[in-house]
Every structure is written in structure tokens, then in C-alpha cells.
Image (cartoon, coloured by chain):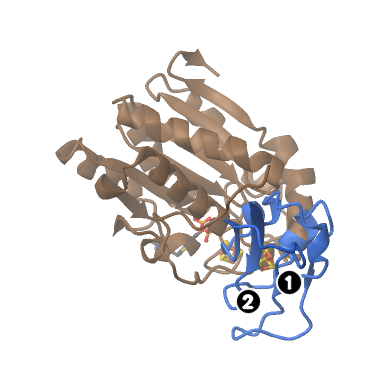
């Protein structure tokens, strides 16, 4: 019945700089829980992005590297190739991964680099003040699309999981979310699968997590959860897009 | 065994996500601010808590801890604070 709930060891006992209600904190915790459960804290290296998670290296109790904007997959490639015994993952936002870093992630996935990517899709550039991202929804208002995203001009939002799942090499591609408790267990399962496949020496794995950015969406944390559920989830469908045994 | 539900007042950012997520309507935001200037969550109706940990699962700041404690003899105040 009653469960015990406490901070995982792999998560540092510090306050984060994230805004109230920002789901980055939940995703950090899930990653840390999985690292604890797999007992790999002593041989894990995370690669922090440029974006709101730029300071992620302060929030975990294992090694971290900071990469230039969008270049975390290149850094992960280097670390994992030199030290295949390490558990290596990148933690990247949608501006970082799907905009400036799009070619890095596509080629790392296609080469079948044996690291894992945690991809936080909050449909906006958070850190820099809420500019339109490749994942911004049609008509979504951002500081660079004040009248809403005009899809005639900039195209439809990019579905990163579907795009990468079209490649032959990646082992595991899944999209989950953490906006409600009922989704969190599946999100954690996906992260655990991805890391486990990496431990088994399987090729590239990525878990996309549909997230909120209350500050830059201009909503309360509660309203942003509702908006994500009503607007993002129908477009960014949850599920496994690629598994080592075939399509998801 | 019984359980104890603790909100770390000074870690909490008053986002209200736990208040909304609690299926038993146990939590509320305080009316006084914490060291960060936020209105932290508290157990307003502790006796209704079933220690399901949904609030803790949703808290982005890991401000909620739930732990088992040994039964006290008279089970008054079993909701914890
Ligand atoms: C080379 C370079 N170009 C641009 C920037 C400015 N910049 C910093 S963060 C960011 C986007 C971050 O958005 P996202 O990856 O979605 O992460 P979030 O902040 O939403 O978590 C940009 C464009 C930079 N730091 N370096
Ligand atoms: S700006 Fe958005 S993504 Fe960045 S910490 Fe705040 S809520 Fe999170
Ligand atoms: S979810 Fe966490 S940070 Fe938000 S109000 Fe509740 S205890 Fe505070």
C-alpha cells in the first residue's frame, strides 16, 4: 500500500534554478532513479545541453560534460567510443536538438552510436525567452511568432521520434510525457529500457519527453499541463516508435 | 507501520502541481512565504492522506518525502505533518 518516496542518490541535494512547475525537474529525477536502479552511478557520464538544462551538471551526483549548443551527440560519440564501458547520455531540449543540433542527432542516430539521448520537448526555446522552436505548435504564440506559428511560412512542427525511427540503425526510439502522474511510470520505463539497451551494447536510443514550460507559454503550471494534454499530446503521440526487435 | 508525509518548505516553489494532483484533496498552498518567496504547499487535511505518493511523483523539485515510521502507541495524529 503505502510507498516510500525520497530523492534518488544520483540526484544532488540542491535547489534547481528551474521555474516553478517546470517538468525538467521531474525528468531529472526519473533519470536519477533509473541510474540508481541500474547501479551505474559510478560509470555514468551525462552531457548537458545549451538551454534551460545547461546547469544539469550541478543537479546529479555523477560525471557531466557541457557541450556547445546542439553538439552533445558529438561529445557523447567521442566519450562512448573511447570508453565503451561507460554509460553515456545526452540531455537536450528541442531548440538544442531539433534546431541547431539537428544534423548532429540525425547522424549520431544513423551511425548507431551506442549512447542514449533524453530529449525534452517543451515546444519552445525556454532559456532564451520563449522563441519559436521547430517543435512549436501551429498557431502557438511565441516571442518570434507573436501572431502564432504560421505553418505556411515555417512548416509543421517536427516529430523527432518519428523522424529518427525512420532510420535503420537506432535500437530504441520512444516518446512519453511526465505531465501527469499516470504517464510518469511509462516515461520512467522508457528511460530504463533505453539505458538497459545501452548496457547491452545495443545501438543508439532516444526517449522524447513531452514537457511544459509554464513561464514561456505564459500560463500557470496547472494550465500548462492542461494545454500540453489538449494540444501537444494529440500531435506528439506517445508510444514506442522503434525497438530492437522491430518497429514499435 | 505507518507513514509520514513531509513537505520541505524551503525546497518548494509553490507551483501547485501537487495540490492539483492529489486525489484526496489533502494539500493546499500556505499563506505565508518561504525563504525563496514562494507560497509552499502544506498538508491542509493530513488525516485524508493515503500516502499514495502521487504528489511526490509530480513534484518537479523533489520537495515531498514520504517515509515509513514505526507505529506510535496511540495512533493520534497519524496523518503526519
Ligand atoms: C551557438 C549558439 N547559438 C544560440 C545560442 C542561444 N541559445 C541558448 S539556449 C537556446 C535554445 C534553448 O532551447 P531548448 O533547447 O528548447 O531548451 P529549453 O531552454 O527549452 O529547455 C538558444 C538558441 C547559444 N547559446 N549558442
Ligand atoms: S523557462 Fe521554461 S524550460 Fe526553462 S526552467 Fe523555466 S519553465 Fe523550465
Ligand atoms: S509540486 Fe512540489 S514545488 Fe510544487 S507546490 Fe507541490 S511541493 Fe511545492
Q: CA distance from mark 2 to mark 1?
A: 8 Å
Of residues A130 and B34, which is closer to you in this image? B34
Q: What kind of element bears circle 2?
A: loop
Q: Horizontal and vertical percent for residue A140?
A: 73, 54
Residue B24: x percent and y percent? 83, 54
Q: Residue furthest front?
A: B73
Q: Which chain is brown?
A: A
Name the residue: 35% across, 44% down.
A89
Q: Are marks 2 and 1 in contact (CB under 8 Å)?
A: yes
Q: Residue B26 appears in which quarter of the rendering?
A: bottom right
Residue at 23% across / 39% down in the picture? A80
A31, A207: nearer the viewer: A31
**Mark 1, other Cα within 10 Å: few <14 / some 14–19 / many ≥20:** many
Residue picked out by circle 2:
B9
Q: Quadrant of the C terminus of chain A?
A: top right
Which corner quadrant of the figure contains ligand 2? bottom right
Tell me if I can see residue A147 in this picture.
Answer: no
Residue A52 x, y percent position in the rendering: 49, 63
Instruction: State how many labels appear.
Output: 2
Does ligand 3 reach within 8 Å of label 2's beta carbon?
Answer: no
Q: Residues within 10 Å of mark 2 (few under 14, many from 20)?
A: many
Left or right of A20, for residue A34:
left
Q: Is residue A116 above or below residue A239?
A: below
Q: Which mark is first along the chain, 1 or 2? A: 2
Can you tell which chain is drawn blue?
A: B
Q: Chain of mark 2?
A: B
Q: Position of residue A131 (x, y in %)?
A: 60, 62
Say which residue label 1 marks: B42
* Residue at the extreme top of the image, as rendered: A246
Instruction: State the mark number for residue A7.
Output: none
Query: Which image quadrant: the N terminus of chain A?
Result: top right
Amino acid at each position: 500500500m503505502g510507498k516510500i518516496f525520497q530523492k534518488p542518490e544520483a540526484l544532488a541535494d540542491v535547489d534547481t534554478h528551474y521555474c516553478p512547475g517546470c517538468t525538467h525537474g521531474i525528468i531529472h529525477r526519473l533519470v536519477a532513479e533509473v541510474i540508481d536502479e541500474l547501479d551505474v552511478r559510478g560509470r555514468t557520464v551525462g552531457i548537458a545541453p545549451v538551454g534551460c538544462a545547461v546547469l544539469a551538471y550541478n543537479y546529479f551526483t555523477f560525471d557531466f560534460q557541457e557541450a556547445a549548443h546542439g553538439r552533445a551527440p558529438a561529445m557523447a560519440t567521442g566519450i562512448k567510443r573511447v570508453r565503451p564501458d561507460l554509460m553515456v547520455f545526452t540531455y537536450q531540449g528541442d531548440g538544442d536538438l531539433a534546431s541547431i543540433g539537428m544534423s548532429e542527432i540525425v547522424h549520431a542516430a544513423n551511425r548507431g552510436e551506442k549512447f542514449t539521448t533524453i530529449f525534452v520537448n517543451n515546444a519552445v526555446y525556454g532559456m532564451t525567452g520563449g522563441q519559436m522552436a521547430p517543435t512549436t505548435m501551429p498557431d502557438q504564440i511565441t516571442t518570434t511568432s507573436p501572431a502564432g506559428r504560421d505553418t505556411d511560412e515555417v512548416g509543421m512542427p517536427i516529430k523527432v521520434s518519428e523522424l529518427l525511427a525512420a532510420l535503420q540503425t537506432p535500437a530504441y526510439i520512444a516518446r512519453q510525457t511526465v505531465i501527469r502522474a499516470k504517464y510518469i511510470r511509462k516515461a520512467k520505463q522508457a528511460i530504463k529500457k533505453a539505458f538497459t539497451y545501452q548496457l547491452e551494447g545495443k545501438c543508439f536510443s532516444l526517449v522524447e519527453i513531452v514537457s511544459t514550460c509554464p513561464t514561456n507559454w505564459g500560463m500557470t503550471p496547472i494550465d500548462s499541463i492542461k494545454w500540453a494534454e489538449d494540444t501537444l499530446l494529440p500531435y506528439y503521440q506517445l508510444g514506442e516508435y522503434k525497438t530492437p526487435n522491430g518497429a514499435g | 507501520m505507518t507513514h509520514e508525509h513531509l513537505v520541505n518548505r524551503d525546497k518548494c516553489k509553490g507551483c501547485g502541481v501537487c495540490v492539483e494532483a492529489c486525489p484526496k484533496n489533502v494539500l493546499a498552498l500556505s499563506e505565508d512565504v518561504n525563504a525563496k518567496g514562494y507560497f509552499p504547499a502544506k498538508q491542509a487535511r493530513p488525516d485524508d492522506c493515503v500516502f499514495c505518493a502521487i504528489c511526490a511523483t509530480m513534484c518537479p523539485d523533489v520537495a515531498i518525502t514520504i517515509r515509513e515510521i514505526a507505529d506510535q502507541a496511540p495512533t493520534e495524529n497519524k496523518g503526519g505533518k
